[in-house]
Image (cartoon, helix red, strand yellow):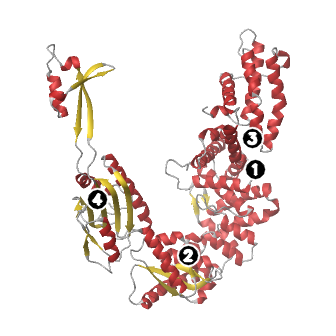
Amino acid sequence: MVAELLLEIGTEEIPSGYLEDGLSALRQLANACLEENRIEIAGGIYTFGTPRRLVLIGKAIAEQQKDLVQEVTGPPKNVAYDNDGRLTKAAIGFAKKQGIAVEDLTCIETPKGEYLYAKNQIPGRPTRDILADALPQVLAKIPWPKSMRWGALNIPFVRPVHWVLAIINGEVVPFEFAGVQSSNITWGHRFMAPDPVQIYSVQGYFQAMKESFVLVDQREREEVVKKAAGLAASAVGGVPVEDAGLVSIVANLVEYPSAVCGGFDKGFLNLPDPVLITAMKKHQRYFAVYDSDSRLMPNFVAINNTVARDESVVRRGHERVLRARLSDADFFFKEDRKRPLAERIEDLKGVIYQADLGTSFAKVQRFARLAQYLAQLFVPDRLDDVKTASLLCKCDLVTHMVAEFPDLQGVMGKEYARMEGYPEDVCIAIHEHYFPERAGGQLSSSAIGAAVSLADRMDTITGCFAVGLIPTGNTDPFALRRHALAIIHILENMGWDLSLTALIDKTLSILGEQVRFDAGKVSNGVQDFFRERFRNMLLRSGYESDPIEAVISVSFDRICGLRERIDQLRKFASESVEFQALTSTFKRVSNILKKQQESFVVSSLLLREDCETVLWDAYQTLKDEVHSCMEKMQYYEAYNLLARLRRPVDDFFDGVEVLTKSDEQLRQNRVGLLQHLSRLFLSVADFSRFSV
């Protein structure tokens, strides 16, 4: 027999940003709880939520846990029975401890001999009884960013609990959580249906909630929000901004969404669009409205948690609040425009970037020099623009607008620079030097923005390493892992064949004028940090460990071509019939050379056997071709060239004793030959990293 479980925790309003993660954790914890207690789940576990309730649904759950069969080995047979074949006190005590009759004891053969054996079947308990014990623990384990304690209770939870609905097949699961006793009672919408409702089934629950003006399914609320916002905006001939993040946030702020379209003074349209959109979104959770030509209209859509009795009253309330916000934004904008961006560079001297690394002004001066170094390498004709963008890109941090709306950093710098007449590429670079803003985010569209972004991020990483702020575990306050991945993506996207070591050392040389540190140690640490980020990035993308290690263990200095190099190695490994044999051959070479500390020169006069001459000639013939292919990034061809050495190497091993003891010069010559081969292989990849 199977049952359906319904659990609902009624609370005060849960922050919108907490809800999704909290529900995900609740589902995982409930699944783990049922599995640990041997309760089968045929239909699955589902979670739903609103600002006032967390809901868990269990479909087709076993009414009783599986029986537990315990098999226990007791004392040896010679201890369990006396000489007359009667059970001893040890055997009787074992039976009593296992809760079985002595006649149910048997003996089994083990590697150590015959032992007494008991098989005890413990009947499963009803699921309802198990959940009564387990659910309070499940709820207490939900990890919240911040929890509360209230009253005399010492149970932390996201918000104070008002009711607990818990039923299985219509029966109440009895337990207490946060001072509240479970029941089959829930409550509807706080304002539109505040009366208690009795629930007897999952289907009845969803129906009762709809009748009580509560849409429990957050996905359903999102659809209602989008539809309602679109309908409200259409009343003024517009469409709401498409913003999935805002839809999700708003849907988790309400239980029964309804929309109203309001307006604001057209004069505010003189503000840059990002300012208007941010003021509406961040503070009020309003949707901006566009006309058919994708221009902002003096309108907005607000999502309410109730159906308004008089929509005009609600609209005026929203308009009054937004008017105050936009008035503040207009004031900040006008104040900022009184001073040009370039004058604000000095203001950065008053902003501490990091105690040991100085002010934001010092940081800008450092990475501006580094950005110019990059410009000279890759875009020398844009050197002046890169310098300008570098010096201006942080100036908006000390504007009134960014102080009020931190999300507009970079955006306001772009807007103010554009109004002051700077070249468009410079304006865009001021904004895009923050790109990518998150994993998988948009990259800079220009070389100017890419150069500034690289310089800024590399200064951050090397600076933090220099003063000991190295990420450990989950601790990464300066987001160095994200910065390293961003640098990797930018180099790959721009196709810049840049030496990572040279870039790090250049950054450290500039930093060293202001901070004292061990440059060699820091450089090695930063290189290892990048190598680890690159490795993890590819592993998360589905790459196998072997080809990654085979390449990055021998070469990691030029990131731009690494992914292609690994891709072609993966292709070679999957397509070439020679791959496994070549790998085995290289491992033989590596094993012989492991204990060879000294390097030897090869003399053709000491090539006694034909197999030695053939191998040396093959090496001499192919080495330049291999190096040429590597320079041209023709990695697959280089791998194929190395495969042509496999048979001569095997013949060499079959034809001579490499580590001969009869002739030291001969031994050194043969070892030298293998050393030359090994260096050639390792200039391409370390095939010993493959497990085949």
Q: Please report contact status of discs 4 and 1: CB closer than 8 Å, yes or no.
A: no
Mark 3 highlights which residue?
636
CA separation, marks 3 and 4? 62 Å
Q: Quadrant of residue 264?
A: bottom right
Q: In which quarter of the image is the C terminus?
A: top right
CA separation, marks 3 and 2? 50 Å
Q: Residues within 10 Å of mark 4 (few under 14, many from 20)?
A: some
Of marks 4 and 1, which one's residue comes earlier in the chain? Answer: 4
Q: Please report contact status of discs 2 and 4: CB closer than 8 Å, yes or no.
A: no
Mark 4 highlights which residue?
155
Q: Mark 4 falls on what kind of element?
A: loop
Q: Mark 3 falls on what kind of element?
A: helix
160 is higher (above) or lower (below) than 543: below
662 is higher (above) or lower (below) than 144: above
Mark 1 highlights which residue?
497
Of marks 3 and 4, which one's residue comes earlier in the chain? Answer: 4
Q: Nearer the viewer, residue 150 or 540?
A: 540
CA separation, marks 2 and 1? 39 Å
Q: Residues within 10 Å of mark 2 (few under 14, many from 20)?
A: some
**Coordinates of residue 429 in the picture (x, y in percent):** 70, 66
**Coordinates of residue 469 in the picture (x, y in percent):** 55, 50
592 is higher (above) or lower (below) than 465: above
Q: In which quarter of the image is residue 373?
A: bottom right
Mark 2 highlights which residue?
278
Q: Residue at x 60, y 71 (%)?
A: 398
Q: Is residue 531 visible?
A: yes
Q: In the image, what residue type sits under mark 2?
A: Thr
Q: In the image, what residue type sits under mark 4?
A: Ile
